[in-house]
Image (spheres, grey):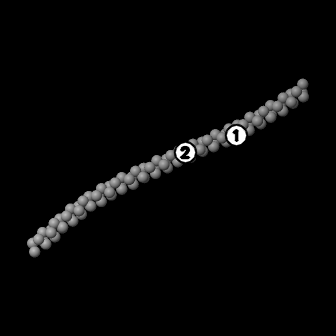
Amino acid sequence: FFAEIVEFQKIVGSLIELVDQLAKAAESEKMKAIGARNLLKSIAKQREAQEQQLQALIAEKKMQLERYRIEYETLCKIEADQNEFIDQFIFQK
């Protein structure tokens, strides 16, 4: 009977060791998964911030393009006025 109890204790001991190893492995995988999830969240936030920066840059460039378009139209009008003045000056002579 005593030998059977000793054998049972050995089996239970090895079972407990195995369960502890599995628990450690599960905890390790859980920590890896948490780390991966946090990394993905971080990457997503970085992309969102980058997208906002690019949207702001696009808006700035659109405003700059509009200013250049207005300036170009103004310069074209000035050029036309100056050409007209030159033509009138030449015809007066």
Number of other residues with Cα within 10 Å of mark 2, as a class: few under 14, some 14 to 19, many 20 or more: few
Q: Answer left or right for 8 relative to 42.
A: right
List the residue tagged with mark 2: 40
Which residue is pictured at 21% across the width and 65% down the height? 79
Where residue 25 is drawn, which disc sits there?
A: 1
Q: How many marks?
A: 2
Number of other residues with Cα within 10 Å of mark 1, as a class: few under 14, some 14 to 19, many 20 or more: few
Residue 29 place in picture, x, y as percent: 66, 41
Q: Where is 79 relative to 24, above or below?
A: below
Residue 69 place in picture, x, y as percent: 28, 58
Instruction: Please name whichever residue, 41 or 72, is drawn nearer the observer in this view of the structure.
Output: 72
Quadrant of the image occupied by residue 19: top right
Q: CA distance from mark 1 to mark 2?
A: 23 Å
Instruction: Please name whichever residue, 1 or 84, is drawn nearer the observer in this view of the structure.
Output: 84
Residue type at mark 1 is Ala
Residue 42 place in picture, x, y as percent: 53, 47
Quadrant of the image occupied by residue 4: top right
Instruction: Please name whichever residue, 64 or 24, is drawn nearer the observer in this view of the structure.
Output: 64
